[in-house]
Image (cartoon, rainbow, N blue to C red):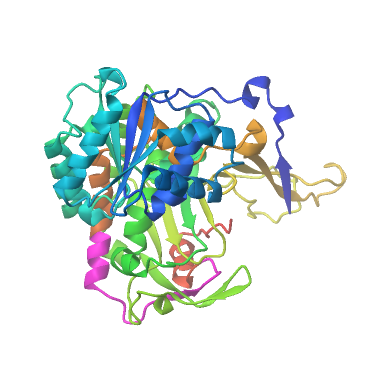
Amino acid sequence: MSIHVKATPSQFPPPMTSMTPREHGDPCSMVIFGATGDLARRKLFAAVYHLAKGRLLAHDFRLIGVDRATMTDQEFRELVRKSVEASEEISGFDAAIWEEFEQRLYYVQGDLTQTSAYTALRERLHALEARIEARHANRFFYLSVPPFIFREIVDHLSSSGLAPRTEDPKGRPWARMIIEKPFGHDLASALSLNHLVLSHFNEHQIYRIDHYLGKETVQNILVLRAANAIFEPIWNRSHISHVQITAAETVGVESRGNYYEHAGVVRDMFQNHLMQLLALTAMELPHRMQANLVRDEKVKAMRAIRPFTLGGLQETVRAQYAAGQIKGKPVPGYREENGVSPSSATPTYAALKLMIDNGRWRGVPFYLRSGKRMARRTTEIAIQFHKPPYLIDGLTGLEPGTEVDPNILVLRVQPDDGVTFRFSAKAPGAALALTPEIEVASVDMDFTYTEAFEQTLSPAYETLILDCMIGDATLFTRSDEVEAGWHVTDPLLEYWAANPPTQMATYEAGSWGPEPADDLLARDGFAWRKP
């Protein structure tokens, strides 16, 4: 039996019903390399427009798109408008806001592998910045491009003088760079890329983006622990039996078959997104919410993850989705997708068991899973507590030794961002003294952001772009974080590459994954949550 309880804004004190106003960004020029690409059209333009709608852009803000396509400023503005109007993350298009916003949009045509593109961009920036104070001539460059041209762009940005190296994080004008994932293909390439970037720029100028960190529930993990006296004292091995982190997608590889064949689920999801969720859940609380202090603790947690041994590697699970149904519609299997080899051994699903060897978590397994074409789109962190050590004699009609369901704290990252806490309670019925047959039910107390705060959440990219303009790197990954993540996943990738399966495990599209993944938890006496 399960009882679902919804919290409403009226149940909270007044401070919970309004959001703290956000700081607006510094005056700056935002340059998007790859401005006609998929990410810019689906996410970035809408995010910046939303900042304009929220009056979070400085008066001296400009957006310059750069790409191979030939177009005028006006044609670029039309492209941006169509992208914004088509975005699912925009709650209503405001023509008046757009009329003001489009005057800040400009375009420069150029091949990003050629010096001429940076010469043209420098001339355009100088012309635009001539109208403003020198200290407002801040710049940040968003590399919305394939990873294979990161190196050339970084070299050109440095040699052209467009993004000079700066020593003082608080100096003006500043130059910053946002780099999209994946940051490297393995540990060796990540080390090489870090060396390249840091040979031209200081760490405080580099913003390695992981859009999961811009989601409200992810940001709330530390607040939930630090601001609530009931959680942090029990956030440890004495009270928690295990942790499950799930990132499930209903989509397949779609048109990304060629990319996915070289990436696979571990590079695509584990090394970045899931590793960040694990680090934020497992880290020690810093004494102050300051970017480097938070990131220091995340790195410590990641470095405490027990390295894979041969036995541990053999217990990991990999699989591919087979044909099935999603939302009642038939979908093909992975090997039938465009760009995918008919004999591919690239996993679209993985489940791992990780142990963290420190005083807080020793002996507590962290189970991570992610897959495409699964039953439901969801990302969550489920913290399961130990079962009650005893039941009051005569309280229920349960047989001696029977256990009630454990308490579970679920942090929902997407969709329906929020928190659910499951506990046990007496189901309605006869008084305790009248019958031993008292039913114990699991009760869910549920908090959702949109309901409690009575407003739509900001898109993750909007939050992260604003943070870059402000200079707050808390939600961006540092070089040692990236390397720590690869230290965990590299042995797994190497083992899988050297030991291809004789027969690749599969799971039906629209299911919750392959049977071996269930066995991974069953051996420890647990079962996967079905969100």
Note whether 55 is above or below 344 in the view shown. above
Q: Is residue 79 left or right of residue 407?
A: left
Looking at the picture, tell me which residue is in the foreground, 495 or 203: 203
Looking at the picture, tell me which residue is in the foreground, 449 or 102: 102
Q: Is residue 202 left or right of residue 353?
A: left
Note whether 465 is above or below 293 in the view shown. below
In the image, residue 146 lies at what x, y percent?
28, 55
Note whether 510 is above or below 161 in the view shown. below
Looking at the picture, tell me which residue is in the foreground, 383 or 511: 511
Q: Is residue 85 left or right of residue 429?
A: left
In the image, residue 91 lies at what x, y percent?
60, 41
In the image, residue 15 lies at what x, y percent?
63, 21
Looking at the picture, tell me which residue is in the foreground, 448 or 367: 448
Quadrant that contains the C terminus: bottom right
| Visible residue check, residue 117 | yes
Quadrant that contains the N terminus: bottom right
Which residue occupies 25% across, 51% down?
A: 486
In the image, residue 276 lies at what x, y percent?
37, 44
Magenta range: 491-512
Magenta span contains residue 496: yes
